[in-house]
Amino acid sequence: EIVLTQSPGTLSLSPGERATLSCRASQSVSSSYLAWYQQKPGQAPRLLIYGASTRATGIPDRFSGSGSGTDFTLTISGLDPEDFAVYYCQQCGGSPYTFGQGTKLEIK
Amino acid sequence: QVQLQESGPGLVKPSETLSLTCIVSGGSISSYKWNWIRQPPGKGLEWIGYIYYSGITDYNPSLKSRVTISVDTSKNQFSLKLNSVAAADTAVYYCARRAAVSGMFYFDYWGQGTLVTVSS
């Protein structure tokens, strides 16, 4: 099983700042199978990034993804108040599909 | 626009079977892998398993002995059964579609989720 470890667990920032979220895999993951999701309270996760770096339809360009192998990063440049949420990375190439434990992005 | 809607009992007794259905609208269930994911209150996401429209399944080893996922293509829906439930199975259960585009895999459409509580 591929274990995804996200850091930090909680990130406290102010609107307008830049957020950098990390996702580290226990073994190499094809970039094609690495996705990022945003989840707000009471809502289902929403796809942000797939293929490690491709923005999903309708996702603002302040969201960007990068990385390869075992290290992946989600960057949000210029935080908007609506960006404060929990973010998960996921791999769905190897079974079982796995998610990271999440990073909570909170308002400082 | 594809939409997924979970349905089923919100309360299940310990040792009984949890049964949920996900109805897919706005698109065909043919092609794609159709998934179940759960999220205990205040915790992270856990993949349960998927079914392909042809009936091929794959399950999380942690739940494999208790899980069955089935598909009804005539009704454009798929279902989850989890037997011998316990309090630890209390969670919001989501259904989701796994897309495959240009060799990239990701969950593009999700249901809104349904809370299932295991309690006597």
Image (cartoon, helix red, strand yellow):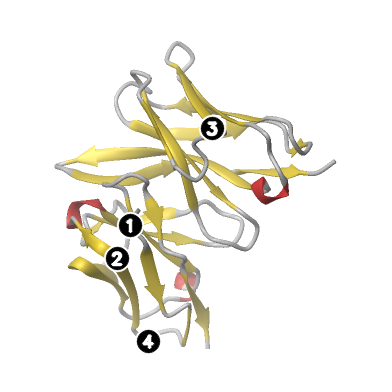
A84 relative to B58 in the view: left or right: right
Give the farthest residue toward the top.
B74
Q: Residues within 10 Å of mark 4 (few under 14, many from 20)?
A: few
Can residue B117 be seen in this snapshot?
A: yes
Residue tagged 4: A17
Label ID, residue B99: none
Picture residue at 37% right of the left edge, 87% below the top:
A17
Residue tagged 2: A25
Picture residue at 34% right of the left edge, 32% below the top:
B33
Looking at the rendered structure, whether the residues under marks 1 and 2 are on a common chain is answered as: yes
Verify CB contact (< 8 Å) between mark 1 and mark 2.
yes
Looking at the rendered structure, whether the residues under marks 1 and 4 are on a common chain is answered as: yes
- Amino acid marked by disc 2: Ala
Upstream in sequence: badge 4 or badge 2: 4
Q: Chain of mark 3?
A: B
Q: CA distance from mark 2 to mark 3?
A: 27 Å
Q: Is residue A60 above or below residue B13?
A: below
Residue tagged 3: B67
Residue tagged 1: A2
Q: Residues within 10 Å of mark 2 (few under 14, many from 20)?
A: many
Quarter of image, res B34: top left
Secondary structure under tag 1 reads: loop
